[in-house]
Amino acid sequence: MKKNYEFRNVLKNGKKVSGEFLNVFILKNQLNYNFLGLAISTKIGNAVQRNKIKRYLRENYKNLEESIYKGYNLVFLVKKDFGEKELNYQNIKTDMKNIFSKAKLIDLM
């Protein structure tokens, strides 16, 4: 997802699922694949740290993508309470798995 109106639609009409580090808004779409949107506040670190967190989010999503059910718009919002030290690859991976299992969107074999 790239357009502002796409983000607003998911944030307004989607179901919110919270984790320790992330909030995810989930909205069903009519397609057979998922759209991914990432939003990180400028209050978190500097640009280098924010881009690193986005890379972690994309990589974790890519690793879980095969087991996630298709047909959803997903917007990940990073909570502002944590710094770059707490938002490492492993913590984001654990949080993503917990969120997807809470939302019943993942088929963990």
Image (cartoon, rainbow, N blue to C red):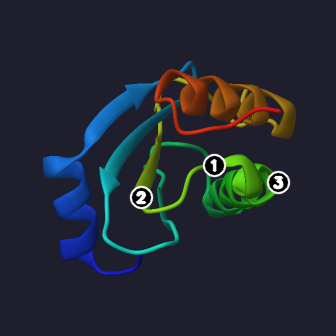
Residue of label 1:
68
- Above or below residue 91? Residue 1 is below
The answer to the question of whether label 1 and label 2 lie on touching residues, with beta carbons closer than 8 A, is yes
Residue 39 falls in which quadrant of the image?
Answer: bottom left
Could you tell me how far apart the alpha carbons at marks 1 and 3 are, in whole angstroms?
Answer: 10 Å
Q: Amino acid at mark 1?
A: Ile
The residue shown at (40%, 75%) is 31
Of circles 3 and 2, the one toward us is: 2
The answer to the question of whether label 3 and label 2 lie on touching residues, with beta carbons closer than 8 A, is no
Residue of label 2:
72
In terms of secondary structure, where does tag 3 sit? helix
**Is residue 91 at all visible to an observer of this figure?**
yes
Count of residue discs: 3
Mark 3 is surrounded, within 10 Å at the Cα level, by few (under 14), some (14 to 19) or many (20 or more) other residues, namely few
Of circles 1 and 3, the one toward us is: 1
The residue shown at (63%, 49%) is 68
- Give residue 75's position: percent from left, percent from top: 42, 54
- Above or below residue 58? Residue 44 is above
Residue of label 3:
63
Mark 1 is surrounded, within 10 Å at the Cα level, by few (under 14), some (14 to 19) or many (20 or more) other residues, namely many
